[in-house]
Image: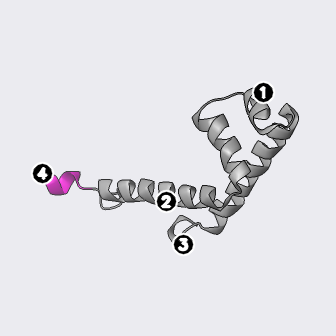
Amino acid sequence: MRELLHDPDARAIEDEVFEQDEIVHRMSAAIGALSKRDQLVLNHYYREERTLREISREIAVSESRVSQIRSAAVAKLGVLLNASQPAWAA
C-alpha cells in the first residue's frame, strides 16, 4: 500500500524545513548587510508595527524621509537576496 501512495516527485518534509531554514538564514544575512539606520527603520516598521510618524520622531527626520528609507531598504534587500539565491532556487 505504501508503494501505491508514494510520490517520488513529492518534496520530503525535511526538504521543506531545510528550505525555511535557508530562507531565514539568507534574510538574516541580507538584513545584517544593511546600514544600522535601514535596519532600525525596517525593524520598527515591520516587527514593532510602528507608524512612519513614530519612527520619524525617533530618528529626527520627516515621515516622507522614513518612507523613502524604508522603500530603499526593501529594494536593497531584494538585490541582496537575489544575489545570494542558491543555484537550486534559480
Element at label 4: loop
For the residues labelled 1 and 3, the Cα–Cα distance comes to 41 Å
Mark 3 or mark 1, which is nearer the start of the sequence? 1
Mark identifier at residue 87: 3
- Which residues are the magenta region? 2-6
Label 4 or label 1, whichever lies nearer to me, is 1
Expressed as whole percent of the image width and height from the top left, the position of residue 31 reads: 62, 55
Give the amino acid type for the residue marked by disc 2 in the picture: His
Give above or below for 16 relative to 88: above
Measured in 3D between alpha carbons, the distance from the residue under mark 2 to the one under mark 3, in whole angstroms, is: 16 Å
Q: Earlier in the sequence, mark 4 or mark 3?
A: 4
Q: Quadrant of the C terminus?
A: bottom right
User: Counting residues from the N terminus, which is met first, the one under dot 4 or under dot 1?
Assistant: 4
**Residue type of the residue flagged with mark 1:** Arg
Tag 2, which secondary structure?
helix
**Residue 60, placed above or below residue 17:** above
Q: Determine which residue is flagged by label 4.
A: 1
- Foreground mark, 2 or 3, reads 2
